[in-house]
Image (cartoon, helix red, strand yellow):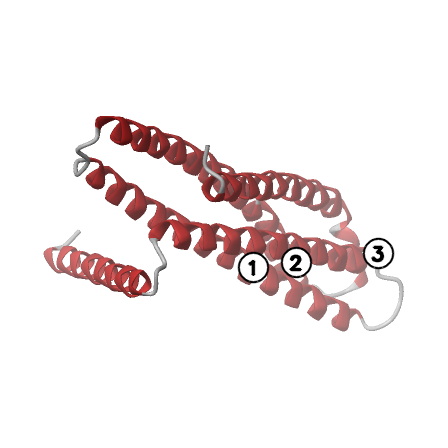
Amino acid sequence: MTSLTKVLLIASLTLVAACESTYYSAMETMGVEKRDILVDRVEEARDSQEEAQEQFASALEQFSALINFDGGELQDVYEALSDEYEASEDAASDVRGRIDAIEDVSDDLFDEWRQELEQYTNANLRRDSERKLRDTERRSKQLLTSMRRAESRMAPVLDALRDNVLYLKHNLNASAVGALQGELNSIEADVAQLIKEMNAAIAESDAFIASIENPA
């Protein structure tokens, strides 16, 4: 990494941190704390995953329609699949961005929480707050692990869809479609695993939100 690259990277990170700090300050003036922002972002990521599930299922349906093509305009079916692939890419990008946003605010929340522990004069209250911090951090890590696991399942589906779309782009005929028959089962299995992992992450999201809104 060159010196200029390092300087630009540091400047970029500093700018991002400054923007986040300004955002938090603005939200706090309206009575919205980092904890509230975290809950909102978890809800947004959960909704994004639900939408991604529907999108990937739609892409699979369109790929199946192409593989089982039986008359009509093959070009129209191909273009519909290409559109579904691009929509799936967008859905995956949105999910990744939502998870990154959770990670950012949770890190900032826990840093602030740890610093504020030092301000207590009441030892009992400090211990209780410290216990809640550890529990919330544990739940957050568990949630992010589940979300990242589901996110990783999107890549094989996107790769397969991209490969098939590219292949058909220059080989759009019944013979080429027939050559892809074996791809359908593989993509079906990948989408099924993706939906399973996303359902687990969505359940983790609901549990995490409940733990924040109704702490023990």
For residue 91, the mark is 1
Compared with 48, 144 (above or below) is above
Badge 1 marks a residue whose secondary structure is helix
- The residue that disc 3 covers is 68
Image position, residue 172 (x, y; %): 72, 66
Q: What amino acid type should be assigned to the residue bearing mark 1? A: Ala
Q: How crowded is mark 2: few (under 14 residues within 10 Å), some or many (20 or more)?
A: many
Front in this rendered view, residue 2 or 48: 48
For residue 69, the mark is none
Q: How crowded is mark 3: few (under 14 residues within 10 Å), some or many (20 or more)?
A: few
First in residue order: circle 2 vs circle 3 = 2
Q: How crowded is mark 1: few (under 14 residues within 10 Å), some or many (20 or more)?
A: many
First in residue order: circle 3 vs circle 1 = 3
Compared with 182, 19 (above or below) is below
Image position, residue 139 (x, y; %): 44, 34
Mark 2 vs 1: CB contact within 8 A: yes
Left or right for 159, reference 36: right
- The residue that disc 2 covers is 55
Q: How far apart are marks 2 and 1 (CA)?
A: 7 Å
Left or right for 161, reference 152: right
Q: Which residue lies furthest to the left in this view?
A: 3
Quadrant of residue 202 within the rendered picture = top right
First in residue order: circle 2 vs circle 1 = 2
Foreground disc of the pair 3, 1: 1
Quadrant of residue 76 within the rendered picture = bottom right
Q: What amino acid type should be assigned to the residue bearing mark 3? A: Asn
Front in this rendered view, residue 97 or 28: 28
Residue 132 in view here: yes
Quadrant of residue 91 within the rendered picture = bottom right
Image position, residue 4 (x, y; %): 12, 60
